[in-house]
Image (cartoon, rainbow, N blue to C red):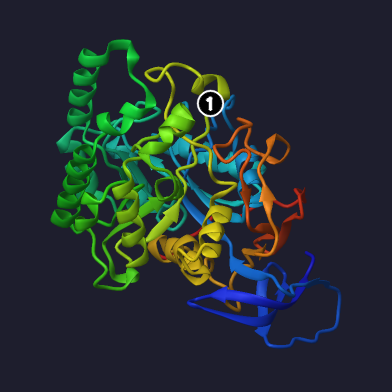
Amino acid sequence: MQNYLIKNIAVVNEGSTTVQDVYIREGRIEKMAPQISISGNYVEIDGTGKHLLPGVIDDQVHFREPGLTEKATIYTEARAAVAGGTTSFMEMPNTKPAALTQELLEDKYAIGKQHSLANYSFFMGASNDNVEEILKTNAKKDIVCGVKVFMGSSTGNMLVDNYLTLEKIFSSTELLVATHCEDEKIVRHNAELFKQEKGDQLTAADHPLIRSVEACFESSWTAIQFAKKHDARLHILHISTAKELQLFTNMMPLADKRITAEVCVHHLHFTADDYAQYGNLIKCNPAIKSADNKAALWEGLLDDRLDIIATDHAPHTWAEKQQPYQQAPSGVPLVQHSLLLMLQYVKEGRISIEKVAEKMSHAPAICFRIKERGFIREGYFADLVIADLQGNTGVNKENIYYKCGWSPFEGHTFPAAITHTFVSGHLAYENGQFNENVKGHRLTFNI
């Protein structure tokens, strides 16, 4: 395996930025020091003026394989992820068929091993009638990231709304339980009211009113009650409302929390006002809501009530998104541009680069207890990203790597560039070129 010496680079890690040399040997970070001189066979990279960050760990993506490969594949989306500085992902079970048995779950791991340029893990899926299969995952808690429970319906028909099932999951599962929280009764009631009022004239602007603040809050509150009752490890995905923030705390270190929360980049960037421009392209579940919610999410992120930044990357074809609102599926492709977007906010002074590394790399590693990743430490796997904050990246059809071929950021120029991405020490991406002869690793977890 090729070794690398990165010279004179600003290392962003664990709350500070210092100029150092970093030596990568046999896939791991061998040494970090102000000056490193070594002999032997290695490739030297001049990092002068650039930043070295730990690779992004995205704990929520939908790569659509198996069964929905007209939208995306594990190969295409992992490749896009690596181009954007995401070195590890955790993928959701709502594929076709859904990952509701141990056999189907391992089928996805086999695809990842063969085709994923990034490191990978896959959630075990929950339904109203597969609790026994879920509990078999307890024996795999060192090699499976968690159990995903859709407490609100979304793409894939995996709604879990039976309270007896939820009771059994939260009381018996030894893995982290990750939840999509939207109250189905409230959503359906709102949808019926809007249909009566507007008929076929519903648009994407109605989406945050149908999938409302109350729907999100009630479901998140319910999940937390189950988790507290059984002392389960709960992680609530894609928080989108100000009201939900009262459910979370910043009064203890992340490693001590039993209940954690995530915010996604699209909820930090867009508001309901943007439906006028983007329409169904930013239709997602939970919905992008009003500007006051976005402002509260930023506050909750910066004061640590929200623990992780992720994407909920969820591609659909362009043709699917051009359908009328009620037929157009929910989901936005984001994994290639999430780090670039947050670096834009660094340049704008909204967040520090150290906080970006914390929320996109350190925190997912702590939250999911990922072994030897998420930090720039000697002995850890070299999952690393070189970013040029003096460069720029324009988004266009030629450099969008998602299989769906579109992005809500098309036509936008980010004021930063990802120049190199190392995955487990392998230089997988360099200045627009991929090196695909080595695949990512299956993530492992401390139990």
What element does badge 1 sit on?
loop
Q: Tell me residue 113's x, y (percent).
A: 62, 46
Q: In this orientation, which residue lies closer to the viewer: 271 or 78?
A: 271
Q: Report crowding for label 1: few under 14, some 14 to 19, many 20 or more residues within 10 A (C-alpha).
A: some
Can residue 147 be spotted in the picture?
A: yes
Q: Tell me residue 219's x, y (percent).
A: 20, 41
Q: Tell me residue 24's x, y (percent).
A: 71, 73
Corner quadrant of residue 44:
bottom right
Q: In this orientation, which residue lies closer to the viewer: 208 or 439?
A: 208
Q: In this orientation, which residue lies closer to the viewer: 36 or 297?
A: 297
Q: Is residue 234 above or below residue 106?
A: below
Q: Is residue 65 above or below residue 6?
A: above
- How many numbered marks appear? 1
Corner quadrant of residue 115:
top right
Is 175 situated left or right of 409 in this image? left
Residue at the location (65% across, 82% down)?
A: 19
Residue at the location (52% across, 64% down)?
A: 346
Q: Quadrant of the N terminus?
A: bottom right
Q: Tell me residue 59's x, y (percent).
A: 45, 51
Can residue 239 be spotted in the picture?
A: no
Name the amino acid type tagged 1.
Leu
Residue position marked by numbered label 1 in the rendering: 68
Q: In this orientation, which residue lies closer to the viewer: 2 or 168?
A: 2
Q: Quadrant of the C terminus?
A: bottom left
Is 272 situated left or right of 42 in this image? left
Residue at the location (83% across, 73% down)?
A: 42
Residue at the location (15% across, 37% down)?
A: 164
Q: Is residue 431 above or below residue 182?
A: below
